[in-house]
Image: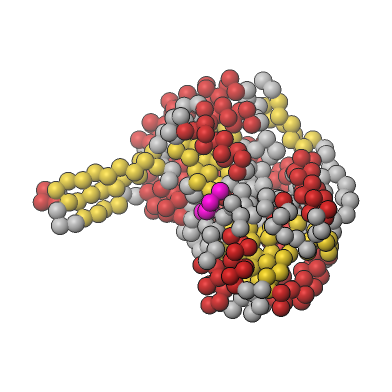
Amino acid sequence: MPTLVSVNPATGEPVGSVEAVTPADIGRVVRAARAAQPAWAALGLEARAAAIKAAAADLKAAADRIGELVTLEMGKPLPEGKGEANHCADSLAEEVVEIVDALRPELLEDKRTRTELHFDALGVCAAITPWNFPVLMPLQSVLPALVAGNAVVLKPSEETPLCADLWARTLAKHLPPGVLQVVHGAGDAGRALVLDDVDLIVFTGSRATGIRIMQDAAAGLKRVILELGGKDPLVVLADADLDAAAAFAVRNSFRNAGQVCVSTERIYVHRDVERPFLDRVLERTKALKQGDGREAGVNVGPMVNARQKQVVERQLAQARSAGARVLAGGGEAPGNFVQPTVLAGVDHSMEIMREETFGPVACVMAFGSDDEAVRLANDSPYGLGAAVFGERAHAERVGRALTAGMIGINQGCGGASGTPWVGARHSGYGFHSGKAGHRQFTQVRAVSRPLATA
């Protein structure tokens, strides 16, 4: 059996290892899931939910260790790693209740017909999850699939196998054998899973990989839920609270070293307030502490690996050669680190303003009118999140003109409890979370009969 070694990106030291699969092993795993799924579905919605909720105490007990592994494997500051793991444990029961409410049968009637909508299992779900939120994304991919009655084969990112493995195996102890299985490997293992006898593929990752998954799934008309990349804009209007806008810009550009699908990667600020806004951004950026996520006070960790650092450095070099100005950061950094960097003098001819960077870079460009701001913000194939800061009514008018799936007004794009996580354009195909998102993990069946005999 091959071995997958996990490496700390801050130090280059091994963290641990797990047994990996080869593409040839995938068929056996999927067959076990297929065999286990009917009995799991037959338990019924409430019994499945109870089995999953029974894992909450064990997940809470393991949360700090899982969070430590998050930091060791992908580099985010330890309070954020532990915060992610503890949030997932604390919210599990509430999340399951929300999913159950979404999947209960729904009754429709008119003058002639009574229809019951049932939300049944699809069968076997392949969940392929990323390294940047290696516990949260399995939670959001695996839970609705399981509550719906599907069996799940989870393939976490090869960058973060240990934390995802501990989370999944802790949950799986409370489930029948075969209902939740974990496989580890690189892209060839993920592709083998997509091509095997699965009914639903849930993937979070890059646009390029999402396109390949859609192509591979097409021959079997398999259901897909794809959360893909982003190039999120922030629009700062002339009537914005500049302190709040700058605080958000720095936090959302550099959180998790910019390795967040809804990181702010493009900032458009009205030229009347460009200078005072930049002053505030630079002051906050220079106050950040970068280093190993285990060190006290660290705000920004490393890139997850050398390849991701090279992507960021290449985009920065191209932008600088085309005339972009570095206002903060941009210098040499050791290992996998990239300094939090603020660029001005950018335009849409530069790759750094068109393609996902996924690194700690804030690009700032001025605009003169609302129409220009909207045009610039929408000039992208992506459409995941966006934010607009300004007088509320003004910001809402501009926000409603943006093509993103999620738009924050004087805040980030995250919504109230029950809001789906949804992208537009190339940022997603299907979506998850919220009532409508949970139902995408099911086959909808409409059972109708004449009202007179109901």
Rendered residue at 51%/67% (across/down):
400
Residue 272: x percent and y percent? 71, 78
44 and 55: which is toward the camera: 44
92 and 210: which is toward the camera: 210
- Magenta span: predominant SS is loop
Residue 125: x percent and y percent? 48, 35
Q: Quadrant of the N terminus?
A: top right
Rendered residue at 45%/50% (across/down):
437
- Tell me the magenta residue range: 422-426
In the figure, residue 383 lies in which quadrant? bottom right
In the figure, residue 38 lies in which quadrant? top left
Q: Is residue 272 left or right of residue 386?
A: right
Residue 183: x percent and y percent? 60, 30
Residue 137: x percent and y percent? 58, 46
Is any part of residue 181 visible from this angle?
A: yes
Give the color scheme: rainbow, by chain, secondary structure or one colour. secondary structure
Rendered residue at 56%/48% (across/down):
426
Is any part of residue 143 visible from this angle?
A: no
Rendered residue at 68%/39% (across/down):
160
250 and 139: which is toward the camera: 250
249 and 124: which is toward the camera: 249
Question: Does 420 appear in magenta?
Answer: no
65 in relation to 197, above or below: below
Q: Is residue 235 left or right of residue 322?
A: left
Q: Give the residue furthest to the left.
A: 452
Q: Count numbered badges in the picture.
A: 0
